[in-house]
Image (cartoon, rainbow, N blue to C red):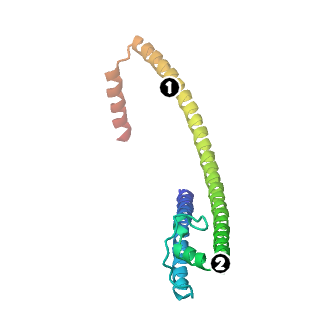
Amino acid sequence: MGSMRCNAVVVRVCLGLVALSIAGYIVGPPLYWHLVEALAAINHSSSSCPACLCDCSSQPIISIPQGLRNTSFGDCAKQNPEANADTEQNFAEVLSEELKLRETQAVENQQHADLALLEAKKIASQYQKEADKCNSGMETCEEAREKAEISLVAQKKLTALWEQRARQKGWKEGAAKSRTQSQGKVQSS
């Protein structure tokens, strides 16, 4: 009983860790990119690039996901060709770092999932062994019950036969009880 509670606690802890890993996997990247954008905005405000007043096309210079877009970098790059190459290189580095981070995170999540799966398999195996023991015990009990039932039927038949013989010889049920009770009183005196 104590080991079942311990197993249940282990399963709950493993499930909690998996849930935290999944939550980190879902919430982590957006938080990371918001932080990167905030740092870029701070760097941009302190950079030497003047504010751009131009009519920008709807297509960005580099195709970047919507969450990562910061058009002010693109506008500055249009006016300064040297900054354009640096900006592209910086975006490429940031995207490369993000891909490496996600790959590392995916490998870690896979390892956690593999460990949780292995633990679940161990627990399932233990439960299967316990179920097999229980089934074996039930089969043994059922066999013993059937044997006892057969024995009881045989004893009832034998008792009925003896009772029938006794009645044929003049035995009456009420007389036997009163005689047994009177003998019990005589012996106790």
Does residue 53 lie above or below 135 as drawn? Answer: below
Q: CA distance from mark 2 to mark 1?
A: 103 Å
Quarter assignment of residue 103: bottom right
Q: Helix, strand, or loop for circle 1?
A: helix
**Number of numbered labels in the structure image:** 2
Relative to residue 59, is residue 165 drawn left or right?
left
- For the C terminus, the image quarter is top left
Does residue 157 lie above or below 187 as drawn? Answer: above
Q: For mark 2, does the 10 Å Cα neighbourhood hold few (<14), some (14 to 19), or many (20 or more) residues?
A: few
Q: Position of residue 2 (x, y in %)?
A: 54, 59
Q: Position of residue 55 (x, y in %)?
A: 49, 71
Quarter assignment of residue 94: bottom right
Pointer 2 residue: 81
Q: Nearer the viewer, mark 2 or mark 1?
A: 2
Q: For mark 1, does the 10 Å Cα neighbourhood hold few (<14), some (14 to 19), or many (20 or more) residues?
A: few
**Which of marks 1 and 2 precedes in the sequence?**
2
Q: Helix, strand, or loop for circle 2?
A: helix
Q: Position of residue 149 (x, y in %)?
A: 51, 26
Q: In terms of depth relative to the viewer, which is nearer, 34 or 180?
A: 34
Amino acid carrying label 1: it is: Leu
Q: In terms of depth relative to the viewer, which is nearer, 137 or 36?
A: 36
Pointer 1 residue: 152
Tell me if label 2 and label 1 are in contact, CB under 8 Å: no
Q: Residue at x 34, y 27 (%)?
A: 177
Q: In terms of depth relative to the viewer, which is nearer, 78 or 148?
A: 78
Amino acid carrying label 2: it is: Pro
Q: Which numbered circle lies on residue 135?
A: none
Q: Residue at x 59, y 48 (%)?
A: 127
Does residue 68 lie above or below 53 as drawn? Answer: above
Q: Position of residue 113 (x, y in %)?
A: 63, 58
Q: Residue at x 61, y 38 (%)?
A: 136
